[in-house]
Image (cartoon, rainbow, N blue to C red):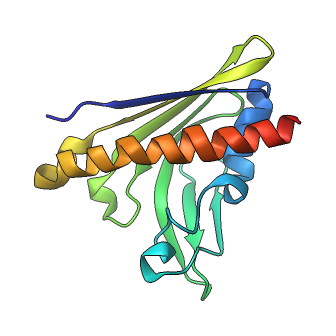
Amino acid sequence: MTDPIHKTVHVPLPPDKAFDLFTEDMASWWPLDSHSLSARDGKPAADVVIEPHKGGRILETHPDGRTDPWATVTEWEPGAKLALDWYVGRDPAEATQITVVFTANGPGTRVDLTHTGFEVLASAATETMLGYRSGWDHVLCACYGDACRKRAA
């Protein structure tokens, strides 16, 4: 059994603005040059967008214009919560679950990400979970956190 991943970053934006940056402007902060399907081919993705509703998808656009889904939105609460079935590069039947909660914290927001459900990956569960543990430090805590700080400045 694998442990859930929990990551927290405090950002200097109110919850609605933190949520909007996370969801509406994902391509501005997500490291598409290293954390995308296109990066596996040595090229950064051209774009990544979230369809803003329950049942929507996160879609990567490759440099050649093709799109690939990364996830399906399972909860959409603007300014408060986003939950996903996350299967980037895999069959949707092998989805893990991500929940991102935005909580007012003084003049800013506490953003809590929880990533669970790695057991669905069977023998690859532990290795995948370990990769995401360090990956979320970079993607959420560094890249998204830095984008929030720049947006607030």
- Could one spot residue 76 in this view of the protein? yes
**Residue at 58%, 65% in the rendered image:** 32
Q: Quadrant of the C terminus?
A: top right
Q: Position of residue 36 (x, y in %)?
A: 50, 66
User: Residue farthest to the top?
Assistant: 106
- Could one spot residue 84 in this view of the protein? no
**Residue at 59%, 73% in the rendered image:** 45
Q: Position of residue 16 (x, y in %)?
A: 77, 30
User: Residue farthest to the bottom?
Assistant: 64
**Residue at 37%, 67% in the rendered image:** 89
Q: Quadrant of the N terminus?
A: top left
Is residue 54 positioned above or below 124 on the image? above
Q: Nearer the viewer, residue 102 or 91?
A: 102
Q: Position of residue 122 (x, y in %)?
A: 13, 50
48 displayed left or right of 95: right
Tally of marks: 0
Q: Position of residue 48 (x, y in %)?
A: 63, 64
User: Residue farthest to the left?
Assistant: 123
**Residue at 57%, 69% in the rendered image:** 33
Q: Nearer the viewer, residue 124 or 69?
A: 124
21 displayed left or right of 45: right
Is residue 130 positioned above or below 30 on the image? above
